[in-house]
Image (spheres, grey):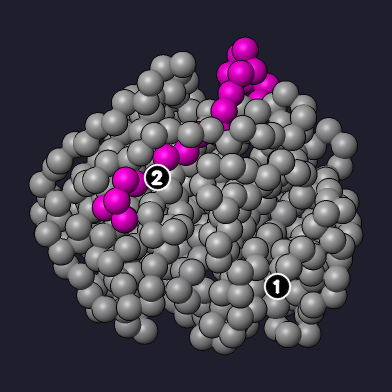
Amino acid sequence: MRRPVPFLIVTAALALAVAPRAPAQTFDTRADRHTVVARCAWSYFGDPRSLLLGGHLVTGCVSTRRWILVADRDLASGRQLVARLRRHDELDDHDNPALAVWRGRLWAFYSPHSGHIWPRNRKTAMRYRATRRGLDVRSGFGVERRVATNTPGGLGYTYPNPVPAGRRLWLFWRGGDWQPTFASTRDGVRWTPARTLARGPRGHRPYAKYVGGPDGSVHVVVSDAHADEGFNSLYYARIHRGRLLAADGRVLGRLRDAPLPLRRLDRLYRFRRATGSAWPHDVAIGRDGRPVVVYTRRRGRTDFFAYARWTGARWRSRELVSAGERYRTFTSGGAALDHADPRRLVLSRRIGAFFEVELWRTPDGGRAWQAPIAVTRSSDAHSFRPVIARGAAGDPLTVQYVHGIPRSFRDFDTTVRLAVAAP
């Protein structure tokens, strides 16, 4: 096995203004004025991709030269370190690392985009490394380890989603059978046997999003299949103390009985041809402790963004806006919630020639929406797959996105860029 190459690049950049969060935000909308974090990309379903840690922005992406990167930028000084964790054999934007803070260290999980295309010999691995000392990327990353467990099926690993929950670190991914898969560790070395969490329709691959709750639970949102299949409902479950619960607390099943059929989970959106096929983009926990979901509904060849929230009595879902005319490699530019305050989200839709990023805000749980705030405008290329860096509510509102004109998920020359809001 090829030895991982630890490598640090030190760059100097123009200092960024750090402003406290305010009810209204503005951005310099010129993408060419936004900070280039790295020449790299990411997909929709490996999360978290970006963390705010004490004035430092930590970003995970896969470079155009096939390196798995973790960038650490000091927002006050603009100085940046980039760690190269491993170089993959293939170029694929699905290979981006997912980040987590657990037991006082920064952890990065990554794998090739395994499946029918890569790797051709079906030999793959979910790998991970943790910083040697605290959250300091400057200390370097320790030895590379493998998650030596997977579900059967021969389709490998894709889309890591690490979720810390107290003394346990959960890891969710799309497993060897193309279904939502999970394992956990208490020491960062030994993992419980991989299990399928829920099973979708035969021959299809569900897509899932995950987030940890303050009580040590894990919230899951999952579709029946890829949105192109055209029949997706959307389902929710909360993993807590060995049980899977609906939003109202009903017991859906025991974790030890997994996999559960998707139809047994809490359905937050029912597919209808008139409203479209759902695809999850993010799930977060509101300040009231209730789950919030942003997703798309595909009708024909067009995606429409929608926002769902558990009111305490039922799921309320509202459609926001059309994503516009599709591009050849994606139908919408993606969306993500502000995990510190999920009354805000970023989305990417076609405005004119290219997809542009906007900030959307609701004051009342999704009934009404304020006028969107442009993050990018009049771009020279697509700005897509935006995220709001996850961090404490007092940190600056920090938006990142992929910028460029990708030819496919395996052929791209793009950058991940950074925009920080000013009051």
Magenta region, mostly helix, strand or loop?
Answer: loop
Q: Position of residue 87 (x, y in %)?
A: 38, 24
Instruction: Between residue 291 and residue 161, name the one nearer to us.
Output: 161
Which residue is drawn at the image coordinates 51% and 77% (left, top)?
A: 343
Disc nearer the start of the sequence (2/1): 2
What amino acid is found at the position of numbered circle 2 in the picture?
Ala
Q: Are marks 2 and 1 in contact (CB under 8 Å)?
A: no
Q: Position of residue 314 (x, y in %)?
A: 78, 80
The kind of secondary structure element at disc 1 is strand
Label 2 crowding class (10 Å Cα cut-off): few <14, some 14-19, many 20+?
many
Q: Position of residue 396 (x, y in %)?
A: 29, 71
Instruction: Between residue 324 and residue 55, name the one nearer to us.
Output: 55
Which residue is drawn at the image coordinates 79% and 77% (left, top)?
A: 249
Rendered view: 372 above or below 115: below
Which residue is drawn at the image coordinates 27% and 48% (left, top)?
A: 137
Is residue 240 visible in this depiction of the protein?
A: yes
What amino acid is found at the position of numbered circle 1 in the picture?
Ser
What residue sits right under mark 1 in the picture? 317
Label 1 crowding class (10 Å Cα cut-off): few <14, some 14-19, many 20+?
many
- The span picked out in magenta is 115-136
Closer to the camera: disc 2 or disc 1?
2
Q: CA distance from mark 2 to mark 1?
A: 39 Å
Q: Position of residue 422 (x, y in %)?
A: 24, 73
Q: Is residue 161 left or right of residue 310?
A: left
The kind of secondary structure element at disc 2 is strand
Rendered view: 45 above or below 399: above
Q: Residue 130 — which label? A: 2
Q: Is residue 320 magenta?
A: no
Is residue 224 visible in this depiction of the protein?
A: no
Q: Quadrant of the C terminus?
A: bottom left
Which residue is drawn at the image coordinates 85% and 75% (left, top)?
A: 250
